[in-house]
Amino acid sequence: MQLAILVLVSVLGGVASTPLQVPLGTELNPYPTKPKVTFKEDGTFKVTVFSDLHFGENPWDDWGPVQDQNSINLINRVLAEEKPDYAVINGDLVTGENTFKENATTLIDQIVAPFINASVPFSTSQGNHDNQANITHEEEILREQSLTELSYTRLAPPGIGGDHGPGNYWVPIYRSANDQSPVLILWFFDSRGGVKTSTDPVPDWVDASVAGWVESETKLMESAWGPASERGAVAFVHIPPHIAKPLQDNLDSTKNPGDNEDYLGDGSMQNPADTTFWDALTLNVKNLHAVVSGHDHGNNWCARNTDKNVVFCFNKHSGYGGYNRGWVHGVRNLFFTSPDPTVGVKTWIREEDGTVKASVTLDSNYVLVLQALPRAVPVL
Ligand SMILES: *[C@@H]1O[C@H](CO)[C@@H](O)[C@H](O)[C@H]1NC(C)=O
Ligand SMILES: *[C@@H]1O[C@H](CO)[C@@H](O)[C@H](O)[C@H]1NC(C)=O
Ligand SMILES: *[C@@H]1O[C@H](CO)[C@@H](O)[C@H](O)[C@H]1NC(C)=O
């Protein structure tokens, strides 16, 4: 037992020589001081996903602060009406280009306040606008962690995530608080992007180092909790994986409902260098219900990638900041009707006023969409 605790501490502390095995029955809970996030007693679990809030835009005129207040009103209303069991903010929390060195992270205070007010546990991924001259992903995460115990966001172990990409972690969701093994894992990945200084760009894909980490973490989970097939999973990453492009080329409006108003060109997706990560994710994580991204504010469809047999979904643009060509704002909901990891997940777009759109159930019947033929990889 003492050995197990010792091993666990060294794993979670990010010690370089991560063991792949712990004794079956090891708790492996990265949040020993926080309440376990659980399904409801009735066996359901609802995740509400906010995306692209873009706080802090144009602080020098009246327009910017008004947009932030509109976004705060939206978050308050959605949390009060949806009453999610967990909330996600899937990247581009701030418009980092418009932030000031001395107070950039105070925007995080404004963003998390409604979640504290509503007592909703949550975590975040970071986007390309969160890495800018006056702000970094790491600064945002450390600020968020310092503000509230409701935050489950973590930093990846040292050496994982690449340059400016520390936001890789997972959150276990349990059937009930007394359980030692979770029934669902929420994975969060850092697709990086943005700049370090005004002229020095950061690569815009999940770093290849994350692939080995996914493999070692899933092996560790199997040793502690049993086979991966006993757990469900959802992955959140701000910039869509590059496989979103051929999906867009083959959408069918009845099978893939939702807005499709952003053409996926260069910069709309991760660089194909995300393949190392994508292969490791889809190989090692079982019952992966969906991979969910923001970034392209005009899109909110879901479609299945037949190559890896995994569903990809866009979020809904939530923030009043960030580009918007007249689209209403809203969120994506993910609703688990059962803790059984093989039961499909219902998902839909909720617009700010409560209108429900693009409702689909992501199960094994969820439509297969033909992939386009392989295309030439653009040089970026
Ligand atoms: C807290 O939430 C309530 C209910 O949604 C809302 O009316 C109120 O404005 C919120 N308070 C703050 C400070 O956001
Ligand atoms: C960064 O912050 C400094 C200090 O507030 C400000 O003068 C500068 O314009 C900001 N730089 C950028 C690129 O926004
Ligand atoms: C940060 O400081 C700038 C410059 O003093 C100011 O215009 C801006 O409103 C401040 N932002 C926040 C979030 O406090």
Image (spheres, rainbow, N blue to C red):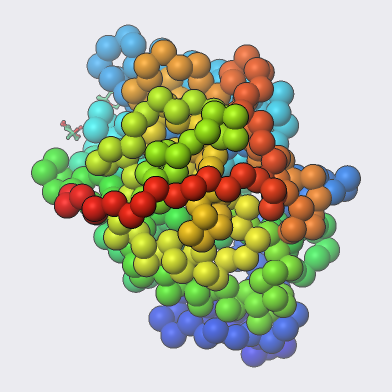
Query: Looking at the image, which is closer to me, 339 or 33?
Result: 339
Say whether residue 18 is visible: yes
Query: Looking at the image, which is closer to me, 4 or 310?
Result: 310
Q: Quadrant of residue 79?
A: top right
Q: How many marks?
A: 0
Expressed as whole percent of the image width and height from the top left, the position of residue 151 reads 57, 47
Residue 312 appears left or right of 196: right
- The residue depicted at 41 percent of the width and 13 percent of the height is 326
- The residue depicted at 45 percent of the width and 17 percent of the height is 327
- The residue depicted at 59 percent of the width and 20 percent of the height is 351
Image height of 331 relative to 236, above or below:
above
Residue 281 appears left or right of 277: right
Expressed as whole percent of the image width and height from the top left, the position of residue 48 reads 63, 36
Q: Quadrant of residue 294?
A: top left
Outermost residue to the right? 42
Say whether residue 240 is visible: no
Outermost residue to the left? 199
Expressed as whole percent of the image width and height from the top left, the position of residue 27 reads 70, 73
Expressed as whole percent of the image width and height from the top left, the position of residue 156 reads 44, 64
Residue 5 appears left or right of 50: right
- The residue depicted at 71 percent of the width and 23 percent of the height is 81
Query: Looking at the image, which is closer to me, 139 or 53?
Result: 53
**Quadrant where the N terminus lies?**
bottom right
Image height of 294 relative to 39, above or below:
above
